[in-house]
């Protein structure tokens, strides 16, 4: 999966550049995030501003990343369009992730960790 | 004329010239035909587009009006909408029929011929689906914000062909024909999850957080069919959802070069809205049917909540703005899905979500037949909708706790009322789910509601007596008289005015005319013309010639044992044998007409179709009875055929075994068209009888109570009836002796076995003696032309209460709490 990765506020801001996160690209997405996590990068902002559709494998991949981070960091999500948010609501993932309207607020949230 | 002005003129104008230009324009630019190459088919399309143009502004204005009022809306969820043809009905309701008729005549086009090009939208099996369509017409006519939600089936109910007397099913690909009617709304598509598993996780606060994961997603794409009310003030819509794949094909597989497998997923998803299931097929265990039901519910609820949230931040006002009616148990998953959406997606706490759900939902029961009450195996539900099963269990747990407090120690009651049937296989009882989750539960005729309360769901009635109510079904007179029987509509208009189009009870004014010889003559003339029209059609389709001067005795409805087409055939055999063996001359010659489809998997019903044809073959070939009897089966019964058949009936057969037909609406349609009922005390027959007067209908047979008693006391022994009644014995013997199947001996032996030794579940033999007795009276009375006309006119005059407008007003006032929004500007034509 094509992603733009920037360091901000002591964490990584990950911007997937593809409009769909599904079975075709989620494994790659997950593997790359897990690689950073294993390397100690456990404060991550996932910027979904370019993504218009996530299927359940995409959601599962994001969930796996959060679990891998554990208590020592956080994965927060920002810039989620309404249509996409309904999929997070559907799975009740809204109750285990923190969501922010923009990158700035999301970065601020992980800064203090 | 300026371009804009001309555009408005041809798209909206209601003058002859505007309509002519519109038809011409659409023929050329929408169908790509020059006028010189017009065909009835292309003219139909041009006409349909021209009518659609005239609906659009009204549709948009209606929606804007509702939004401005923040009106409470009714959403009618139904797995079937049996719409039939729309063009004529739309023209009548828009007030354009006559103008267009004239406009086309000037262009050398016959509107009647063009109308025949429209195929029926057969998105339903029978009564339940047609009721839904009648309700939509009434809602729009009453200016009420009421919308239908259903499935955009690619194939409607099968088309029925007949081969050697046997039903042969053919695919009904209505979509190609219906394009002008509908508007695709891809911008309002929704994502529907299916399958997957529930992961038992904790949320950020450490609370239990069940997460529905690993689902597959299906896209629901809405198609709107505008529903115009009479007067053209209000145009609501019927929203039908088609299932589409979330990705056109699996790119990964495609890239690997396996093109076939790449589209498999797409095809599987689109199967969801591919076919309408015929009724009477065993649906339990059929995964696709369950998926269809959930797909309907999930699409509808997403749309309902989306619209509500456009103007509301929280769900406080939801029950004041939304009413959802569940047309039978097919959409019963609404209860679980609404709970899931409120609790999971919008974080509403359980108790409040439950209160909202109950206040929003109403449930209409349509059947007393135990085999038709839906149940879904827990194992299937767990696989297809794992989170919903969890929710159903939670609802059940809380519900049974409440019951055990009210009836301590009554474990049998708990078992009976549980949403889960434990044995032989664990199943979810959908009727129980619908009842528990609704504030209103209604039956569809007085008798049906009483039986519902006393038998099928008695425990629930004891728990919530106030939730149960009756809403006797109704029919729309715009379809079943104004459109279907223009000659009678015109005569009634000349006699009592046209108010009946919106207030059917004004037909009461006809009562004083019932004995008037001039009016009787006009009335009978209309009937005769309708019989001629039907006879021509029968000749074209079956090559059987009917004499319109004979008594047209019609049994037209779905073929099912409980509806007792077999009893009608037994009567015909009896008449035939009386003529040829006893030499008895009947008081009047008769034509017996049947129409109806049997579910493809329903063997007995299909055999009854064969029996009808076999009897018809023998009777119609026997020159001894040619002046007295004719029997015909008209194939492919559908709404447009019903519109042709019903106005031509002298008597109509409503002869289901008492206690089995929930309501019936065919009875109302026939009576409205001046046909007398021969019927049992079943369903709405009872109320019709009360309205039109017992002396103006022909009632026979055991009552529901009598049948219950006979059964309970084990006092019904068909063999004794056989031994004790010459007529019964002769009919049974004729079947045994292969009189109607000489080249296929034993073909109908199963009938005799089922009736004499199989218990005769639907009491044919018990009711047969009184049936032939009442039929003799029918024949004698019909010979008295004036007396018959008087009865028929009184039937029309007194049937007004059975308008679906009355039914809808009752639902609106007592269940949905919605109102007519009358402030929309009146349309000039009205």
Image: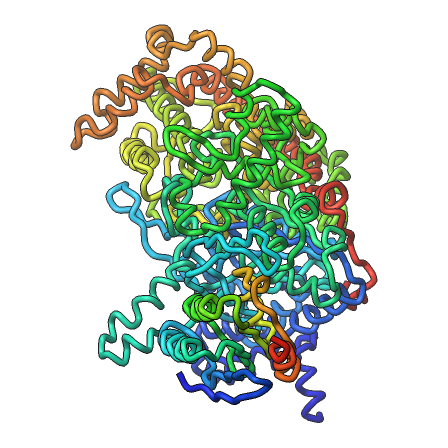
Residue B407 position, x and y percent, is 63, 20
Relative height, residue B275 to residue B726 (above, below)? below
Q: Residue at horizontal 60%, vertical 59%? A: B345
Relative height, residue B551 to residue A92 (above, below)? above
Residue A38 position, x and y percent, is 41, 76
**Left of B817 or right of it: where is B104?**
left
Q: Nearer the viewer, residue B743 or B109?
A: B743
Q: Residue at horizontal 38%, vertical 18%? A: B584
Relative height, residue B499 to residue B414 (above, below)? below
Q: Residue B563 lies in what quarter of the image?
A: top left
Relative height, residue B283 to residue B193 (above, below)? above
Quadrant where the image shows the N terminus of chain B: bottom right
Quadrant where the image shows the C terminus of chain B: bottom right
**Left of B426 or right of it: where is B230?**
right
Q: Nearer the viewer, residue B570 or A18?
A: A18
Q: Residue B90 lies in what quarter of the image?
A: bottom right
């Amino acid at each position: 999966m094509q992603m733009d990765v920037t360091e901000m506020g002591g964490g990584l801001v990950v911007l997937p550049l593809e409009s769909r996160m599904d079975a075709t690209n989620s494994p790659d997405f997950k593997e790359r995030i897990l690689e950073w996590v294993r390397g100690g990068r456990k404060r991550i902002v996932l910027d979904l501003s370019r993504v218009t559709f996530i299927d359940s494998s995409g959601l599962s991949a994001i969930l796996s990343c959060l679990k891998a981070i554990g208590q020592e960091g956080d994965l927060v999500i920002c810039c989620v369009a309404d249509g996409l948010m309904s999929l997070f609501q559907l799975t009740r993932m809204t109750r285990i992730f923190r969501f922010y309207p923009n990158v700035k607020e999301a970065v601020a949230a992980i800064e203090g960790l | 004329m300026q371009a804009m002005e001309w555009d408005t003129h041809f798209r909206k104008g209601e003058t002859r010239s505007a309509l002519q230009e519109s038809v011409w324009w659409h023929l050329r630019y929408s169908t790509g035909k020059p006028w010189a190459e017009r065909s009835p088919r292309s003219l139909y399309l041009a006409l349909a587009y021209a009518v659609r143009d005239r609906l659009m502004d009204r549709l948009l204005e209606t929606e804007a009006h509702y939004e401005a009022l923040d009106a409470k809306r009714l959403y009618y969820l139904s797995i079937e909408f049996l719409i039939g043809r729309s063009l004529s009905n739309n023209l009548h309701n828009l007030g354009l029929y006559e103008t267009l008729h004239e406009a086309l005549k000037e262009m050398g086009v016959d509107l009647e011929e063009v109308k025949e090009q429209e195929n029926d939208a057969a998105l339903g099996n029978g009564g339940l689906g047609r009721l839904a369509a009648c309700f939509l017409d009434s809602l729009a006519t009453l200016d009420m914000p009421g919308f239908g939600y259903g499935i955009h089936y690619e194939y409607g109910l099968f088309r029925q062909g007949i081969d050697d007397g046997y039903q042969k099913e053919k695919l009904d690909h209505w979509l190609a024909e219906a394009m002008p009617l509908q508007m695709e709304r891809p911008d309002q598509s929704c994502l529907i999850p299916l399958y997957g598993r529930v992961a038992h996780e904790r949320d950020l606060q450490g609370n239990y957080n069940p997460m529905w994961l690993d689902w597959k997603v299906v896209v629901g794409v809405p198609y709107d069919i505008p529903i115009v009310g009479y007067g053209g003030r209000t145009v609501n819509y019927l929203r039908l959802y088609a299932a589409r794949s979330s990705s056109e094909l699996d790119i990964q597989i495609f890239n690997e070069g396996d093109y076939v497998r790449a589209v498999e997923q797409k095809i599987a998803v689109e199967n969801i809205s591919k076919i309408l299931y015929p009724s009477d097929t065993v649906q339990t265990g059929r995964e696709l049917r369950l998926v269809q039901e959930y797909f309907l519910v999930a699409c509808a609820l997403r749309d309902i909540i989306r619209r509500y949230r456009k103007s509301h931040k929280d769900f406080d006002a939801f029950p004041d703005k939304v009413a959802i009616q569940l047309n039978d148990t097919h959409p019963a998953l609404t209860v679980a899905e609404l709970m899931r959406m409120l609790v999971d997606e919008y974080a509403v706490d359980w108790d409040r979500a439950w209160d909202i759900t109950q206040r929003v939902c109403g449930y209409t029961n349509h059947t007393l037949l135990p085999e038709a009450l839906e149940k879904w195996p827990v194992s299937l539900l767990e696989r297809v909708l794992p989170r919903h099963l969890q929710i159903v269990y939670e609802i059940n747990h809380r519900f049974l706790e409440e019951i055990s407090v009210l009836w301590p120690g009554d474990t049998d009651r708990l078992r009976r009322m549980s949403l889960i049937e434990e044995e032989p296989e664990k199943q979810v009882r959908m009727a129980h789910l619908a009842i528990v989750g609704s504030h209103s539960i209604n039956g569809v005729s007085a008798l049906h509601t009483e039986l519902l309360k006393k038998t099928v769901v008695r425990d629930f009635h004891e728990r919530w007596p106030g939730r149960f109510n009756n809403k006797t079904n109704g029919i729309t007179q715009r379809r079943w008289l104004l459109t279907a029987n223009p000659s009678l509509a015109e005569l009634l208009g000349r006699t009592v005015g046209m108010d009946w189009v919106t207030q059917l009870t004004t037909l009461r004014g006809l009562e004083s005319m019932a004995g008037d010889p001039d009016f009787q003559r006009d009335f009978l003339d209309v009937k005769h013309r309708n019989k001629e029209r039907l006879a021509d059609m029968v000749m074209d389709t079956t090559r059987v010639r009917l004499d319109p001067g004979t008594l047209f005795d019609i049994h037209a409805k779905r073929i099912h044992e409980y509806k007792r087409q077999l009893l009608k055939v037994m009567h015909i055999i009896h008449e035939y044998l009386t003529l040829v063996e006893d030499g008895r001359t009947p008081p009047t010659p008769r034509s017996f007409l049947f129409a109806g489809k049997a579910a493809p998997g329903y063997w007995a019903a299909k055999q009854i179709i064969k029996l009808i044809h076999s009897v018809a073959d023998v009777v119609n070939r026997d020159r001894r009875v040619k002046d007295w009897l004719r029997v015909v089966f008209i194939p492919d019964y559908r709404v447009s055929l019903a519109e042709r058949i019903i106005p031509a009936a002298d008597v109509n057969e409503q002869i289901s075994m008492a206690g089995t037909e929930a309501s019936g609406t065919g009875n109302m349609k026939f009576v409205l068209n001046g046909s007398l009922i021969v019927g049992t005390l079943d369903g709405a027959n009872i109320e019709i009888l009360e309205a039109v007067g017992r002396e103006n209908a022909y009632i026979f047979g055991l009552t529901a109570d009598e049948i219950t008693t006979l059964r309970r006391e084990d006092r019904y022994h068909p063999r004794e009836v056989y031994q004790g009644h010459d007529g019964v014995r002769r009919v049974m013997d004729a079947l045994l002796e292969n009189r109607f199947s000489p080249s296929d001996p034993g073909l109908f032996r199963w009938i005799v076995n089922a009736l004499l030794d199989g218990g005769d579940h639907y009491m044919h033999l018990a009711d047969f003696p009184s049936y032939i007795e009442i039929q003799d009276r029918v024949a004698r009375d019909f010979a008295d032309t004036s007396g018959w006309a008087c009865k028929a006119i009184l039937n029309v005059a007194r049937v007004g209460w059975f308008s679906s407008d009355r039914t809808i007003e009752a639902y609106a006032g007592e269940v949905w709490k919605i109102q007519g929004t009358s402030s929309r500007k009146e349309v000039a034509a009205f």
